[in-house]
Image (cartoon, rainbow, N blue to C red):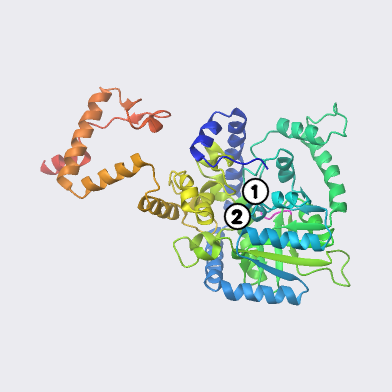
Amino acid sequence: MHPRSRAFRANAAKALVDPGLQAALGKLKAGFRIKRAAAVARLPEFEALRDAGKAIKDHTLAHLDAYLETFETRAIAAGGQVHWARDATEARAAVLAICRAAGARTVTKGKSMVAEEIGLNEHLEANGLTPVETDLGEYIIQLRHEGPSHIVVPAIHLDRHAVADAFRAAHRERAPERDLSEPRAMLDEAREELRRHFLAADVGITGANFLIAETGSTAIVTNEGNGDLTQTLPRVHIVVAGIEKVVPTLNDAAVLIRLLARSATGQEVSVYTTFSTGPRRREDLDGPEEFHVVLLDNGRSAMLGGPFQDMLRCIRCAACINHCPVYGTVGGHAYGWVYPGPMGAVLTPAQVGLAEGRELVEASTLCGRCEQVCPMRIPLPAMLRHWRERAFERHLVPTRQHWGLMVWGFAARRPWLYHTAMRTAAWGLAWLARGSGGLRTLPGIGGWTASRDLPAPAGRTFRDQWTQRLRR
């Protein structure tokens, strides 16, 4: 994949003037948000379900070691193999070793954000294997050498013309004059292309929405049949999942599944919900000969017991992304890392370090909409504020911002100075506005006034006006 720029501000500036992207993001605002609201309205117990889901994940995280050990024991008893990976390097090595032992040349993959997190495709390609994404959106962006711009709909930034161009460039053995003007034609072409890869693959790799401790099973929730074909046709099935995906029982998984589809796409339930338990048994009609689960830490255990533990409740539904005004304006690629939106702004610094991911911490209005719609009640704004506090303490914020906060703090601790400064600023801004009602330009805050007016103050501070009213 092409390397991404990690500079959020520069990426965002380009995204704002990209007409194709802006058109695609407009559809996002009118799509998932409306569908989710309708699905929630049809389920009177949705809020109670959120409470139940939160309780399940909190309980699991409080006993994560025990449930992971139980999962490992049950998965091995069912004939599977479990591999533990502390970081992306170990996870990639484990997957590559399994592929080499199987003599694999072609690997099919279901959509997996954890595979994106560890850079699995690039690693397999560098070692002589051919990974083929089988989710339609992932397949499209793989042809374009891009990363996903959304964790549920990875190609949401593209229109049908861009998809048609990608197919013509990649499927060169087909007639160049063929009609790809309709989505159905492109879907049929992708299905034909992928079918031969499904049949040729030696190894299939999927992620997991849930790991069930009581049975040693993994579960994937999809809207395409590619997930089932990826894990049943090849001789070897590899599941790559974060350690936080474990839940105690099948009943617990069922509660979270009821939350997942409604929050993600506004569906009552996804088209496919598939549970896998070990390799094919003698009486099974299909399935892999080997079943492997790679459990990835990659900074997750470090979040336990700290201010970011609640983030481990995330079920990757993307509700926070779909409702975020920042994501809705600049899209996913602007974030520069694997996970975009509010959840990415919290996760990325935990995985790559605050020094690397600091800009994402600022990529939020803290409006709170993400927390309102999160099915797991994750306090995303509070965690973003905590990251900002850490950035300030470590002097990672820009010098102007750092000194600005220092000056504000100095004045705020001295009421007489603060009130004098506010009176002076209120009078000065009102004078500059000269009855126009707002300021279109002002030195030092061009980032704000470039796209909006700054309302002019009344000329007196609220404190002064309140004091005068009390004296009447």
What's the residue at 60%, 55% (across, down)?
316
* Left or right, residue 70 beside residue 325: right
The location of residue 381, given as percent across then percent down, is 44, 52
Q: Disc 2 designates what residue?
A: 316
Q: What is the x, y in percent for residue 388?
A: 40, 50
Quadrant of the frame with the N terminus: top right
- Position in image of residue 54 (x %, y %): 53, 64
Is residue 95 magenta-colored?
A: no
Q: Residues within 10 Å of mark 1 (few under 14, many from 20)?
A: many
Q: Is residue 251 left or right of residue 108?
A: left
Amino acid at dot 2: Arg
What is the distance, in whole Å, between disc 1 and disc 2 at their CAs? 8 Å
Task: Report the predominant secondary structure element of the magenta stretch.
Answer: loop
Residue 386's quadrant in the figure? bottom left
**Image x and y of residue 432, in percent:** 25, 24
Tell me, yes or no, if residue 178 can be seen here: yes
Q: Nearer the viewer, residue 114 or 209?
A: 114
Q: Is residue 267 magenta?
A: yes
Q: Residue furthest left?
A: 471
Counting residues from the start of the chain, the first of labels 1 and 2 encountered is 1
Judge by depth and name the residue closer to the eye, 127 or 421.
127
Q: Residue at x 50, y 58 (%)?
A: 377
Report the side of 90 relative to 78 (left or right): left
Q: Which residue is mark 1?
A: 152
The image quadrant that residue 403 belongs to is: top left
- Start-end of magenta stretch: 266-271
